[in-house]
Each structure stands twice: as structure tokens, then as C-alpha cells.
Amino acid sequence: MRFTRRQLFKAAGATALTGIIGSQLSHRASAHVDIDEEIVITTGEMFFQQEGKAQGEAIRVPANKVVRLVFKNGGTVLHDVHLGKDADLAGRKYNTNLAAPFDMMELPAGGEAWLTFTFEDAQKGEWEMGCFQLAHYESGMKAPFIIE
């Protein structure tokens, strides 16, 4: 089997990025751990919706469990996903970031991606998931994100 140089660099970059994200977000988060809970979240034109729940309804995740958040953009435009508190609309971000160093993820129309987290007791409480693409947050593209 032969690969072009571009294919090899692309594969190496994706592998390196996955390793960086997994190692920095959580000491337990990687592609090789058992997932305690998987939550599927669809984005669309100005909404987040957890599978089996209403649009904009609170997304509840357990603390101290390995949780995989699977995002599916069912819309026709680019959306992003931020997790935090205290929205800064001028800066297009949250002032308090739930999962630093993770800042945000962009999801192209029709795209899918997943993130794996282990939220700790100190992070319990009400946070928010929002899209800060121009005018999306202001149009209601946000949902409570509660760690229990």
C-alpha cells in the first residue's frame, strides 16, 4: 500500500492532535479508556439538542465518570462549541472556561466530532454550552450544561 506525503502528514497531524487533546484535558481521557457514558448532541440552526431531549434542554453529565460527548452538526452552516460561564459577546467566548486548555471546537455543516472528558467534583454545577459564531449565541444557540 502506498501513501502520498500529504496523506502521511495529515495522518501524523491528526494523531499528534488527538494525543495532545487527550493528554491535556484529562489524565483519564484517551481513545483507550472505557467510556462510562456517551451523550449525543445535535447542533442545528441556532440550537443544541441532546438525543432524546428537547432543543435547548439542559445537558446533564456525571462528575467523576469518563464521558464522551458526540457532536453532530445537522445544520447547513458552521457551528462551534464552547463550554463555560459568563458569556463575553464582544470576545465571542466565555470568560470562565470549563475545560481549559480546551477552548472551543468548530463543527462544519454535516460534520461529526467527539470529545472525552472526566469532570471532577470541583466542577459540579451549572455551566453553559454555546455557539459563538456571529449572531448564533444571540439567536439562542446555547443550552445549560450541568455537571452532577
Image: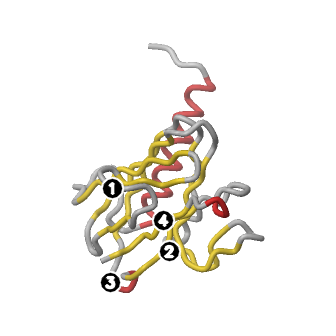
In three-dimensional space, the C-alpha distance between marks 3 and 1, rounded to whole angstroms, equals 25 Å
Work out whether mark 1 precedes mark 2 in sequence or the reverse, and give the earlier one.
Answer: 1
Q: Residue beneath label 4, please?
A: 143
Q: Position of residue 23 (x, y in %)?
A: 43, 62
Work out whether mark 1 precedes mark 4 in sequence or the reverse, and give the earlier one.
Answer: 1
Quadrant of the snapshot with the C terminus: bottom left
Kindly identify the residue that appears in the image at 59 percent across and 61 percent down: 140
Q: Position of residue 1 (x, y in %)?
A: 44, 13
Q: Residue beneath label 2, please?
A: 98
**Pointer 3 with pointer 1, Cβ within 8 A:** no
Q: Amino acid at mark 1?
A: Lys
As displayed, is residue 135 above or below residue 84?
above
Callout 4: helix, strand or loop? Answer: strand
Camera-nearest label, 3 or 4: 4
Kindly identify the residue that appears in the image at 62 percent across and 24 percent down: 5
Other-residue count near label 1 (Cα within 10 Å), few / some / many at <14 / 14–19 / ≥20: few
Q: Which mark is residue 53?
A: 1
Q: Residue beneath label 3, please?
A: 121
- In the picture, residue 58 is in which quadrant? bottom left
In three-dimensional space, the C-alpha distance between marks 1 and 4, rounded to whole angstroms, equals 12 Å
In three-dimensional space, the C-alpha distance between marks 1 and 2, rounded to whole angstroms, equals 23 Å
Other-residue count near label 3 (Cα within 10 Å), few / some / many at <14 / 14–19 / ≥20: few
Work out whether mark 3 precedes mark 2 in sequence or the reverse, and give the earlier one.
Answer: 2
Q: Position of residue 53 (x, y in %)?
A: 33, 55
Camera-nearest label, 3 or 1: 1
**Pointer 3 with pointer 4, Cβ within 8 A:** no
**Pointer 1 with pointer 2, Cβ within 8 A:** no
Q: Number of marks in the image?
A: 4
